Image (tube, grey):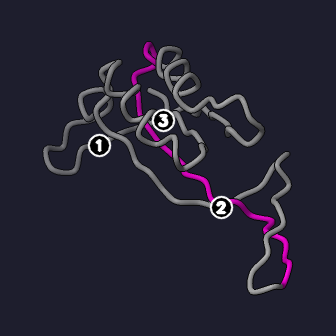
Amino acid sequence: MKLVMAVIKPFKLDDVRDALTEIGLQGMTVTEVKGYGRQQGHTEIYRGAEYSVSFLPKLRIEVAVPSDRVDKTVEALAAAANTGQIGDGKIFVTPIDQTVRIRTGETNDNAL
């Protein structure tokens, strides 16, 4: 079992959710985050004063998937989140040692 984590632009959330639903995944966690990478932020003008915005708003999506579905999940995420512009985000895949569904006590793949 793996945890697929993606950091994406906020306006791509619906596209990503649709893509993951299309491949049969039914559950994700979405967190609003801020960060910067190669985009290096940008400059804005507010009430006549110019200021630098270093941390840009992003969304972090986490999806637990069986190991045999990781490649398909990563492909769907990458295709749905892609705009071709700098700042599209990143996808991380990490192992999950154990999963427990609290309500039923099911474990590992059965808990997904």
> Which residue, as the protein is rendered here, is positioned at the far front?
48
Residue labelled with disc 1? 100
Q: Is residue 102 left or right of residue 41?
A: left
Q: Is residue 54 magenta?
A: yes
Q: Is residue 7 left or right of residue 63?
A: right
Q: Main secondary structure of the magenta part?
A: strand
- Tell me whether the residue at label 3 lies in contact with that at label 2, contact meaning CB atoms closer than 8 angstroms: no
Residue labelled with disc 3? 96
Assess disc 2: are there few (<14), some (14-19) or many (≥20) residues with their C-alpha within 10 Å of its C-alpha.
few
Q: CA distance from mark 3 to mark 1?
A: 11 Å
Q: Quadrant of the C terminus?
A: top left
Which residue type does callout 3 highlight?
Ile
Assess disc 1: are there few (<14), some (14-19) or many (≥20) residues with their C-alpha within 10 Å of its C-alpha.
some
Q: Which mark is residue 34?
A: 2
Q: Residue 81: x, y in percent?
A: 56, 32
Q: Residue 56: x, y in percent?
A: 70, 60
Quadrant position of residue 88: top right
Secondary structure beneath disc 2? strand
Q: CA distance from mark 2 to mark 1?
A: 30 Å
Assess disc 3: are there few (<14), some (14-19) or many (≥20) residues with their C-alpha within 10 Å of its C-alpha.
some
